[in-house]
Image (cartoon, helix red, strand yellow):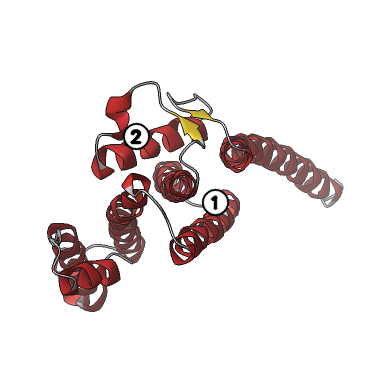
Amino acid sequence: IHLVPSIWEANAGNEVEWIPLIVVVILLVLLAMLYYYKGIVRAFRIDKRTAALIEYSAVTTLVLLSGYFIGISIADGYFRAELDIFDRLFYGTICIMSMFFVYKCCKEIKELIDKECEYSKKTFLFILILLQIAQSFCLSYLSVICMNKSAFVFPEESLTANESVLTFEFFYFSAMTLLTVGGNLNAVSVLAKILVFLESAIFAVFISMIVFSGSFSKTKTGKAEKVQTAEEESIKPVP
């Protein structure tokens, strides 16, 4: 998504920031080395689960950085005077794709809750997935405000100084909304309010699932222990 507009602007004779693209390419090369060169994993004597965790962390870092650079490209539409029909289709597609990515992340969290692994690794993976969800909603908010500049109210004009500042502010707002803390922006349009409500509900739902799954597993374990104790008592030899 970042490469195509860059090539388009370069062909038009405009200045293009190639640094984000170079960073993404370097991260892709490092990720390919981690994935294909298994000798690195064997050389450091890393077990398969730890290697998979490192690989997932690298992928998440790549996704977050790429999402930030994509957000900068999207935020450019906020500073345009007018948008044509193709720009609106582009921003609408970004919003839909971001929601689909949120759905995939929610499925990963559901699988993570049901999976049996170390508590520290499960918590770390849970945080990584939450960051991806926050990044996806950030792209959705940027798409919405590019299509409707009055969708959000900014407390200060300095928050919309340039594309980088605008992208960071929306990522911060998305993260605070996901944690149900609330950000410094106010949603005004109906679509913006719906997205904010969905993001707030996601965290609350999954926290409830984690709490109830833990209590359910304890109850289930307790019942299983009682049944096993009863069976052991029933098969004791009679003196």
Where residue 29 sits, quadrant-wise, is bottom left
Q: Position of residue 125 (x, y in %)?
A: 42, 49
User: What is the number of the mark on residue 109?
Assistant: 1
Name the residue tied to disc 2. 169
Judging depth in this view, the residue of 75 and 135 nearest the camera is 75
Mark 2 is surrounded, within 10 Å at the Cα level, by few (under 14), some (14 to 19) or many (20 or more) other residues, namely some
Residue farthest to the bottom? 36
Please name the residue shown 49% across and 36% down the image.
150
Q: For this rendering, which residue is in front, 237 or 30?
A: 30
Q: Amino acid at mark 1?
A: Ile
Residue drawn at point x = 36 percent, y = 61 percent: 49
- Position of residue 194 relative to residue 112, above or below, is above
Q: Locate residue 18, reporting x and y percent.
A: 13, 62
Amino acid type shown at disc 2:
Glu
Secondary structure category for the residue under label 2: helix
Give residue 188's mark.
Answer: none
- How packed mark 1 is, by other alpha carbons closer than 10 Å (few <14, some 14-19, many 20 or more), is many
Q: CA distance from mark 1 to mark 2?
A: 26 Å
Task: Please state which of residues 18 and 105 is positioned toward the viewer in this rendering.
Answer: 18
**Residue placed furthest toward the top:** 155
Quadrant position of residue 1: bottom left
Residue 213 lies, with reference to residue 56, above or below; the image says above
- State the quadrant of the C terminus: top right
Residue 190, percent across and down? 63, 39
